[in-house]
């Protein structure tokens, strides 16, 4: 059970890294063909998402510290360890669901064609950043 939980955490983290996008770069949004109204809606949507994400990160850090404290013991209570992991995973799930909901809303706001252009632009930037490192 413990190993499955760790694997689940790793996959959730990878998913959020792959899809974690911020739309603060107005040039990127304009390059994807978004108009000012769409950009304003995305910025508003992103602001609401950021609040959910910050809360989730704070809660996950809390549970991570709890887990570290438990694991300092030579013989930790594995039921308690499992409970802390479950709580942490619940917050990671909330964060991931908020990200997915945000992406769905973005697609509704800007339409499929602009969504594809936006994803391509983000991919190009990530590729350039990876090549420059």
Image: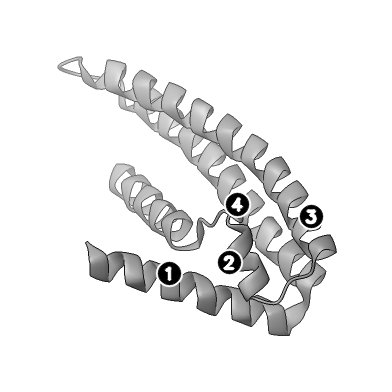
Q: Are marks 3 and 4 in contact (CB under 8 Å)?
A: no
Picture quarter containing residue 84? top left
Residue 100 x/y as whole percent: 63, 59
- The N terminus: image quadrant: top left
Q: Looking at this rendering, what residue extends furthest in the left direction?
A: 74
Nearest the eye: 42 or 69? 42
Q: Is residue 4 above or below residue 123?
A: above
Residue 28: which numbered mark, if any? 2
Q: Who's the residue at 55% across and 37% down the image?
A: 91
Q: Between marks 3 and 2, how big is the CA–CA gap? A: 14 Å
Q: Between marks 1 and 3, how big is the CA–CA gap? A: 22 Å
Considering only order in the chain, which callout, 1 or 4, is on the residue closer to the N terminus? 4
Tag 1: Cα neighbours inside 10 Å, few (<14), some, or many (≥20)? few
Q: Who's the residue at 25% across and 71% down the image?
A: 131
Residue 125: which numbered mark, if any? 1
Tag 4: Cα neighbours inside 10 Å, few (<14), some, or many (≥20)? few
Nearest the eye: 1 or 37? 37
Residue tagged by mark 3? 40
Q: Are marks 1 and 2 in contact (CB under 8 Å)?
A: yes
Q: Secondary structure at mark 1?
A: helix
Q: Are marks 3 and 2 in contact (CB under 8 Å)?
A: no
Residue tagged by mark 4? 24
Q: Secondary structure at mark 4?
A: loop
Q: Between marks 1 and 2, how big is the CA–CA gap? A: 9 Å
């Amino acid at each position: 059970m413990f190993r499955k939980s760790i694997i689940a955490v790793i996959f959730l983290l990878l998913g959020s890294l792959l899809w974690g996008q911020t739309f603060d770069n107005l040039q990127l949004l304009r390059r994807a063909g978004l108009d000012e109204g769409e950009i304003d809606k995305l910025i508003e949507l992103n602001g609401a998402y950021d609040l959910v994400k910050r809360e989730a990160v704070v809660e996950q850090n809390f549970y991570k510290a709890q887990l570290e404290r438990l694991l300092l013991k030579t013989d930790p209570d594995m039921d308690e360890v499992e409970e802390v992991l479950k709580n942490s995973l619940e917050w990671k799930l909330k964060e991931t669901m908020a990200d997915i909901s945000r992406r769905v809303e973005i697609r509704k706001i800007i339409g499929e064609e602009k969504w594809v252009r936006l994803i391509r632009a983000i991919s190009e930037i990530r590729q350039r950043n990876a090549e420059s490192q």
